[in-house]
Image (spheres, rainbow, N blue to C red):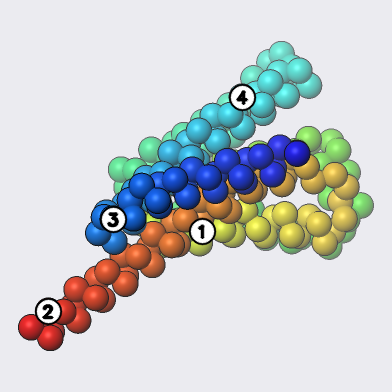
């Protein structure tokens, strides 16, 4: 069993346990539990992925170059995550713009598979790292803007991978591993947002009937 499958199954099992444990609660409470679980799963995944990424770049190229590469993706990711928590209204469009630009870059590279293969060969799994760096702030945003963050995570989990596969740019193991957990968490966020909408609609209907 490979790493992406293990990650996907692990995330699904966690969400399934949460759903079962909260099945007797109100929809709003279940939605909150699902959202918080998604954020926690993404946080754990980001830490694990970060350890692998840092270990990779500290070996190749290593030294000061490896440290600089680490800081280039880690610091902006943390800044975006903090901003998503404290200023979600301002951070949401910024994350949308960054994710859109990233996906557009993937599309642009996909039109030249040779260039994409060369880019990945020279820069390492930069697309996978970008998915992780954008997905974690999106997950934090989900605690404030659940539906929007859900769509962001689904887009980050699906589109770069699909585009890369279409371009046939070579091995995509690292990208699959980076994409599967954001995808699962994004779906969980969307389910949570749907629960809230249905609960609110049901409450309004009962109030109108009364």
Spatial CA span between label 3 and label 2: 22 Å
Q: 160 and 174: which one is in front?
A: 174
- In space, the residues marked 3 and 4 are separated at their CA atoms by 38 Å
Could you tell whether 18 is left or right of 109 in the image?
Answer: left
Question: For the residue labelled by badge 3, is the local secondary structure a helix, a strand or a loop?
Answer: loop
183 to the left or right of 163: left
Q: Position of residue 174 (x, y in %)?
A: 74, 40
In the rendered image, the vertical position of residue 124 relative to residue 8, given as above or below: above
Q: Give me the disc on residue 187.
A: 1
Circle 4: element type? helix
Q: Considering only vertical position in the picture, is 148 above or below 51? A: below
Which residue, as the protein is rendered here, is positioned at the far left? 210
Q: Earlier in the sequence, mark 3 or mark 4?
A: 3
**Which of the two marks, 3 or 4, is nearer to us in this view?**
3
Image label count: 4
Q: Which of marks 1 and 4 is nearer the N terminus?
A: 4
Residue count near mark 3 (Cα–Cα under 10 Å), binned few <14, some 14–19, many ≥20: few
Q: Is residue 163 visible?
A: yes
Q: Which residue is drawn at 78% across and 55% down?
A: 164
Q: Which of 164 and 206 is in front in this view?
A: 206
Q: Residue at x 50, y 33 (%)?
A: 44
In the picture of the structure, the residue carrying the numbered disc 2 is 207
Q: Distance between the residues labelled 1 and 2?
A: 30 Å
- Residue 30, by quadrant, is bottom left
Height in image: 187 above or below 197? above
Along the line of sight, which residue is nearer the eye, 88 or 203?
Answer: 203
Q: Locate residue 143 relative to residue 73 in the image: left or right.
A: left
Kindly state the secondary structure of the residue where label 1 is placed: helix
Q: Residue 24 carries which label?
A: 3
């Amino acid at each position: 069993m490979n790493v992406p499958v293990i990650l996907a199954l692990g995330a699904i099992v966690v969400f399934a346990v949460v759903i079962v444990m909260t099945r007797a609660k109100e929809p709003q409470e279940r939605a909150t539990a699902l959202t918080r679980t998604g954020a926690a799963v993404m946080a754990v995944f980001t830490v694990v992925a970060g350890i692998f990424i840092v270990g990779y770049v500290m070996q190749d190229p290593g030294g000061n170059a490896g440290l600089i590469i680490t800081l280039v993706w880690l610091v902006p990711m943390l800044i975006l995550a903090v901003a998503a928590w404290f200023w979600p209204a301002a951070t949401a469009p910024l994350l949308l713009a960054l994710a859109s630009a990233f996906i557009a870059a993937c599309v642009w590279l996909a039109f030249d598979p040779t260039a994409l293969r060369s880019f990945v060969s020279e820069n390492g799994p930069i697309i996978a790292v970008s998915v992780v760096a954008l997905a974690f702030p999106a997950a934090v945003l989900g605690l404030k803007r659940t539906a929007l963050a859900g769509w962001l995570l689904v887009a980050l989990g699906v589109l770069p991978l699909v585009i890369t596969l279409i371009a046939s740019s070579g091995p995509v193991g690292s990208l699959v591993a980076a994409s599967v957990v954001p995808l699962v968490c994004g779906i969980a966020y969307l389910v949570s947002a749907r629960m809230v909408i249905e609960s609110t609609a049901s409450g309004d209907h009962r109030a109108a009937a009364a």
